[in-house]
Amino acid sequence: MSDNIQNVCNWLDETEEDNLLYDSDDTDADPDFVCTNKHNKIDSESDTDVDVHINLSSSRINNASVASRSRSRSPFIRDNSSYYLGKDKVTKWYKESCTPSNSRTLRRNIVLHLPGVKRVARDVKSIIDCWKLFFPDMVIDEIVKCTNIYLTKIRTNFQRERDCLDTTREEIKALFGLLYLAGVLRSNHLNLKDLWSDDPLSPEYFRAVMPLKRFYLLLRALRFDDINTRTERKMYDKLAAIRMIFDGFVQRCQAVYTVGENCTIDEMLEGFRGRCSFRQYIPNKPNKYGIKIQALVDSRTFFTSNMEVYVGTQPDGPFKFENKPSSIVKRMITPISKTGRNITIDNWYTSIPLVNELLENHNLTTVGTLRKNKKEIPLCFLDTKRREKNSTLFGYSKNLMITSYVPRKNKNVILVSSMHNQGVIDTDSGDQNKPEIITFYNSTKGGVDVVDELKGEYSVSRVSCRWPLTIFFSLMNIAGINSQIIYRENTGNVITRRNYLRSLGRELAKEFMINRLDIPTLSIQLRSTIMKITGIKKQPTQPEHHGTVKERLKCAYCPKNKNRKTMVCCELCNNRICKEHTSTICKSCQTGSEEKSDSE
């Protein structure tokens, strides 16, 4: 009997050695990973086995020992295992976190650069100056230069040269101002004739800034590169028509503002149905067809920090990049690399290797949803038939935590995070028992979607068959959002987006309107409207003769069929007036009328 007891003890010792060897293999696979699991219970369990099986025959003891050894080496998950095994039979997710719940903040969750406006933009206080941080005068001058090149090309198509004159910086800014004001009125899809109509219900501001025909011409001629050299640049860049303006805009966004601790990466779709080699179809987007733009956005302030237009496969050259989701993410995080921030992404971008690489090489944590076809996910995390509603499974590796949550029957959500290290249930979720990681994901994932919503609410976009113009409209919308964020943080003034864009549009058009007062042939109605809007009492430069001239010309107010000619001119606007359209007033009454209008 003593020999049997000794044999049992020897077999148990061999089993424990096998378990230790198996655990050491796991440690070699992940040498830096330390986990405090419950293997220390093996000794007590072994003692119990000795007491229970002390009287068994040697054959039964031998069979039990073989079964125990085979279980310790089985690659499949058992209920009593300390980890879950992924579908690839390699990735291990331990059931218990290796980081104590009361430990201090992990180094990877410490933000190194404080968010907010950078020094170069802190002294900017006015609305127009905040906007100029993104579209400075040198950019406007470049647009004027490229637009004039195109105007020169098409000028021969006009009978009169004055119908296709070159544009100026003030006129282009006035054009942008009208686009912002049209967006404030939510009339970006309204017929422009309704905005320039003489109807009392139509806004008089648009007619005061520029004629409708000129507005049409400028939109048609607006260019962002030299059309004479575009063919050469298109050989290595599909985005050549707006590359310089787009890249410069992105660089200025990064130069004036530091995003917060939580950012999100997602795609925008600028609605476009014209001819474009990289037009995309996304059925779950409102526009469905359009140009896809990847964006990095602050999840709290909704400041857009980085963007990239998806153009498909580029020709060989400096702009040829990989379009894999992981490659896109690594390009988008360039302005925040090594800063300890967190990135929230959806399942189109998320993968386990990407999350590890962002943490190890870029010091960025990641929270994202996982597609269920990823090989690192354990099968039990995908099984919903045997799980209750609102139940959660947590798995832990060296730096990651994976979560499977069942919000309703036969439906589950898989998330992975390098930011979280404890499986905590959010008590504010009530009976839903949501994990804290899902609450965090929901609060930070919508940055790009909110920017899309803000852009669409007061959009400057107009229907166009030119994709560079569609992209530029998107830049204008984002400039309106980003500049308001700068303005709010620099001044502390909380102003609605509608009022901010209205003030911005008026400031952009004001200088050009004042210059229009120098036009001697400007109608009295437009002149009075401009003076009322700008608050400036300015009369046109008058010729030396007043009242009468030697040459007889048609009356400015008589219909053409009357053909009335006169030598009398108005003292204010210098228009020809016949007796029917002339009123006599004494100087005292004229002085009183002017004083009354000034007081009003």
Image (cartoon, rainbow, N blue to C red):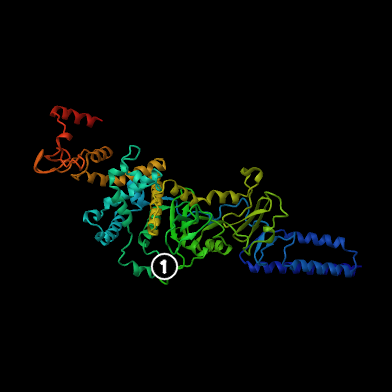
> Disc 1 designates what residue?
319
Count of residue discs: 1
Q: Residue furthest right?
A: 1
Label 1 Cα crowd, 10 Å radius (few <14 / some 14-19 / many 20+): few
Q: Position of residue 80 (x, y in %)?
A: 75, 59
Report helix, strand or loop for mark 1: loop
Can I make out residue 298 in this image? yes
- Residue 234 placement: quadrant: bottom left
Q: Position of residue 88 (x, y in %)?
A: 65, 67
Is residue 224 rendered to the left or right of residue 436?
Answer: left
Can I make out residue 294 in this image? no
Is residue 163 rendered to the left or right of residue 29?
Answer: left
Is residue 504 rendered to the left or right of residue 341?
Answer: left
Name the foreground residue: 431 vs 208: 208
Name the foreground residue: 107 vs 189: 189
Q: In the rendered structure, which amino acid carries the disc numbered 1? A: Phe
Name the foreground residue: 574 vs 106: 574
Q: Residue furthest bottom?
A: 316
Q: Quadrant of the N terminus?
A: bottom right
The image shows residue 339, relative to residue 312, as above or below, that is above
Q: Residue furthest left?
A: 550
Q: Quadrant of the C terminus?
A: top left
- Residue 366 placement: quadrant: bottom right
The image shows residue 549, relative to residue 85, as above or below, that is above
Q: Position of residue 332 (x, y in %)?
A: 47, 60
Q: Position of residue 298 (x, y in %)?
A: 47, 51
Is residue 367 rendered to the left or right of residue 475?
Answer: right
Name the foreground residue: 524 vs 78: 524
